Amino acid sequence: MSTSDQQGRRRTVLVTGVGRRQGIGFAIARRLLGDETTRVFAQSCDGYDVTEPWGVGTAGAKKVLAELSTATDRLGHLDVDFVDPAAPAALFDAAEAGFGATDSLVVNHARSQLGDLASMTVRTLDLTWAVNGRASLLLVQEFAQRYGRHPDGGRVVLFTSGQGQGPMPTEIPYAVSKGAIAAITSTLADSVIERGITVNTINPGPTDTGWATGDLNEFVGRHMPRGRWNTPDEAAAVVAMLLSPDSGSITGQVIGAEGGFRRFTP
């Protein structure tokens, strides 16, 4: 392929949730930047990350992304909180200011929230929906409105966490917000197919991004055929596949990449 052809097929990908070294978002950014024809604009929210047990002592997204310094001319970044309904538009504005129009969107961010039926509150329900549900929809809306044309088509990749595969009674705010992503995938895909944009959702299965505990490690060891957690790099590989030219006929799908997770095994 000639240099001009490569430039014409260059991907400019907006990736959310790229704030922690152990996270899936970082693995996605690193994987995509390994292709010299790809540019990545990353979103983070340090203010949220530091409030979580797995985020205590985090270096902050700027220091984390500095590990990708060899690709600084192809890497942009904005710290923005999706609790603000104006954040998705502001993020796309910043991405366009840095790289021009984006042709791919990877919605990887998530707000975690424990809470069973007795303990969930209006506040936790609203915050979790705002970040996981509302912001995801607004990001897809912004992308569709701004998308021009790419030789291989536009791409949207969303993330869910298997909420439709089994009960999560201790994480009701999180489960309802992420389950909605899986439920709306085919509708979003149909809404943009005429524009040449595909929309798919990944369920990466049990993935250790720094939050695993001893009890969970034992559980995963018994319920995963490989006897280990899935890795962020494995999730990033599925993202790369869905962004590739070969994936143009795949749309409206919730893709299980759980590694054979046997959730109902004793």
Image (cartoon, rainbow, N blue to C red):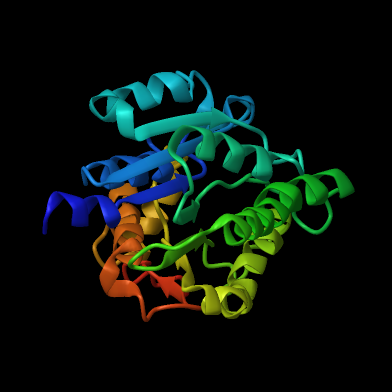
Left or right of residue 6, residue 155 in this image: right
The image quarter containing residue 251 is bottom left
Q: Where is residue 12 in the image (x, y as percent from the top left)?
A: 39, 48
The residue drawn where x is 24% and y is 47% is 37
Q: Residue 177 versus residue 188: which sits nearer the camera? A: 188
Q: Residue 146 versus residue 66: which sits nearer the camera? A: 146
Q: How many marks?
A: 0
Q: Position of residue 61 (x, y in %)?
A: 47, 25
Q: Where is residue 153 in the image (x, y as percent from the top left)?
A: 40, 68
The image quarter containing residue 99 is top left
Question: In this rendering, does residue 266 appear at all?
Answer: no
Question: In this rendering, does residue 191 appear at all?
Answer: yes
Q: Which residue lies furthest to the front in this view?
A: 4
Q: Where is residue 87 in the image (x, y as percent from the top left)?
A: 69, 39
For the C terminus, the quadrant is bottom left
The residue drawn where x is 59% and y is 31% is 45
Q: In this view, does 31 lie above or below 250?
A: above
Q: Is residue 120 above or below residue 1?
A: above
Q: Residue 29 versus residue 12: which sits nearer the camera? A: 12
The residue drawn where x is 37% and y is 66% is 223
Left or right of residue 176, residue 19 in this image: left
Q: In this view, does 72 lie above or below 141?
A: above
Left or right of residue 83, residue 198 in this image: left
Q: Residue 113 versus residue 244: which sits nearer the camera? A: 244
Q: In this view, does 159 lie above or below 264?
A: above
The residue drawn where x is 35% and y is 66% is 242
